Image (cartoon, rainbow, N blue to C red):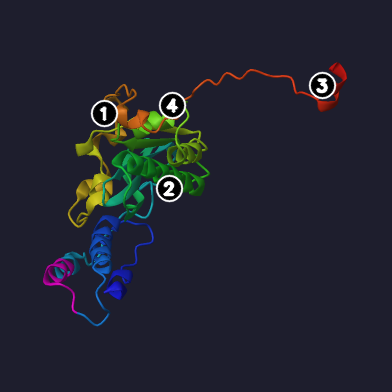
Amino acid sequence: MLSQLAKVYDALGLVSPTTLCGKFIFRDICESKLPWDTLIPADLDKRWKKWHRSLPESLSVMRAISPLRKPITSNHLHAFGDASSQGVCTAVYTVVKQESQTYQGLITAKSRLAKQNLTIPRLELVAGHVAANLADNVQEALSDYHPPIYCWLDSMVAPYWINGSGEYRQFVANRVQKIKQHQDITWCHVPTDQNLADLGSRDGNVSNAVQWINGPPWLSFPNQWPTKVDIGPSSESSAQAIEQNEVLAMALPKKDEFTELMKK
């Protein structure tokens, strides 16, 4: 079973939403702690066979980020991140403008199992961290253009942590610090129903998912981007803040034993 999952060679993560579904099933099988020579339960066997049949024969994307041999006037990177209690996903798209045409499409993606016992806001922050790292890797590969990066999250908590200046508990503080090392990223909010990374955080079939390959239709038109939202503190974001208590201390002179004896 694991060998079948490993046979899917997907270095760029283009079908990662589909392979993530196989990882869900494999994790459930491992957690059942069955002996190695025992048949898996019927429900898990049915899920596995259904997933195996759903694997696409192939998935094609354009190799070049610009289809025409003409000068590129601008190039932007857009990383979408999302998380659920099951998985974390990031998908990076490029928008390349030339004199006569604009092209947008998927460059790379990454889906992975979510660490259990983490809250959704924390997992959304993990998704933002993965999005920042993956987009930064693509930007480095396109160093000749050094395209600006836009990261899109549908979370209302993670962007507040990222853009805030408060002090947070260790888990949040460490990731916010690492995310802020990528100083040239613009963080944006996208509605959940328009977040393409949602397909890869829960599992999804990418065979007929046109937007997964091409990106959302509005991506090439900044005037059509989702409306900016004011993100303020919430109970979830405040729960990770460190309370600052002012401690007043009174300095007392240190008593010297010899001095005390001389006073007598």
Whole-angstrom CA distance, mark 4 to mark 2, is: 22 Å
**Residue type (three-letter) at the residue carrying disc 4:** Gly
| Amino acid type assigned to the residue bearing label 2 in the image | Leu
- Which of the marked residues, 4 or 1, is nearer the chain's N terminus? 4
Q: Going by the image, does 73 lie left or right of 9?
A: right
- Find disc 3 in the rendering and name its residue: 260
The residue singled out by tag 1 in the image is 226
Name the residue at 61% across, 20% down.
Answer: 249
Q: In the rendered structure, which segment of residues is drawn in magenta?
A: 39-48
**Above-or-below relation of 243 to 24:** above
Query: What residue did someone put label 4 on?
Result: 164
Q: Could you say whether the residue bearing mark 3 is in a helix, strand or loop?
A: helix
Are circles 4 and 1 on residues that touch, CB within 8 Å?
A: no
Quarter of the rendering containing residue 103: top left
- Foreground of the two, 39 or 262: 262
Q: Position of residue 192 (x, y in %)?
A: 22, 37
Which mark is nearer the camera, 4 or 2? 4
Q: Which residue is mark 2?
A: 134
Q: Is residue 136 magenta?
A: no
Q: Is residue 95 above or below residue 41?
A: above
Residue type for callout 3: Glu
